[in-house]
Image: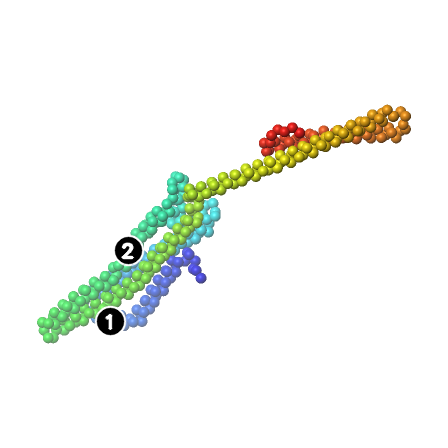
Amino acid sequence: MHMPAHRYSFNILIQMLIAILVLLTLAFAVQTWFLQTYVQFQATPIGIIINSVIVVVFVIGLLHIAYLLTRYMHEEKALSLFQTHSDQRDPLESVPPNSFISQRYLIMQSLYQQKSSINQAALAASLSAIEKAKTYVPRFINNTLILLGVFGTVVSLSMALTGSAGLLQSSVNEEGMGMVIHGMSTALSTTITAILCYVFFNYFFNALQHAQSHIFAQLENITSLYLIPVFQTDHSQVNHHLVELIQSLKDSVAEQHQARSELQTQLSQSQEHMQQWEVQMNALAQHSQAIADALKLHQHNEDIGFADLHQVLEQMTILQSNTQQQNSQNLQQIQSLLQQGFRLTDTPL
């Protein structure tokens, strides 16, 4: 199960707190040996001074690491907030203005407005260099702790040699013997202090570097997924979209030509049908007129039924003529609309 991204630095801080509590518990458990080694068997304050210097340097470096981890914890929260609000109009609304992602967003926005190319590798290298410069103190202390232990050992051995020189001058020299024991004890205590502090500090210094790499990776991933598509115009991507657009236009033109061809064919067929219909209507009109003329010749010799039939035929003739005119007008309107919409040739009906 993966831990939330914004809790990576927080978990390291919790580990540091637990480790400090364990170290203090062990020191309390062996307090008798601790007092004898570091206080009672010290004939001179040299051992106490060297051990105090090692511990003070260790504490300063540890506080610096805790400060950087706390800062990275806030940066991880800012990245998480930006990722959550990335689909909003202003994704920086809830993000601290001095965070990594805010600065990256504003830099890329400025480059985009200036129509400059965006080099993500250069931005990442610049941020990495700035942050590595802020870890100068922990890096220096990490390289110095073990050397302070070596320095304490060398000083203690020199004290022991001084005491052994006094032993050579006389067979019984309690001061010289005490100096030898003191030197050996001081060498032991400074070495133990330096080794413990170095192991403890080196672990959390490496954890700090891992947290730094982790947040840089998160920042670059968000830049690639959310910022680059918004602020960077890739020429290959533009060319790809242009090719797709041209192909789409070609397909649209081909479909339009095909539709025009089919419409012209249907219009021609409709014109042929209309012409046939007109011929049939004209023939019907001629037959109706002939019938009407014949009825007029016999209207005085026939009864009232023929007069009614003549009236009906006249109404049919008028209705057919009106229908023919209306259909012709409708067809003219359809052809005019089609000519305007599809730019057809002006073919008379």
Residue under the image location 33 percent in, 51 percent down: 128
Q: Distance between the residues labelled 1 and 2?
A: 33 Å
Compared with 242, 203 (above or below) is below
Q: Which colour scheme is used?
A: rainbow
Q: Position of residue 322 (x, y in %)?
A: 74, 29
Q: Position of residue 7 (x, y in %)?
A: 41, 58
Q: In which quadrant will I find the C terminus?
A: top right
Instruction: State the SS at label 1.
Output: helix
Is any part of residue 39 visible from this angle? no
State the residue in front, 246 or 13.
246
Q: Position of residue 301 (x, y in %)?
A: 90, 25
Q: Which of marks 1 and 2 is in front?
A: 2
Q: Do callouts 1 and 2 mark residues in contact (Cβ within 8 Å)?
A: no
Residue under the image location 57 percent in, 36 percent down: 257
Q: Name the residue under label 1.
A: 36
Compared with 86, 18 (above or below) is below
Q: In which quarter of the image is residue 236?
A: top left
Q: Which amino acid does label 2 sit on?
A: Val
Q: Name the residue under label 2.
A: 137
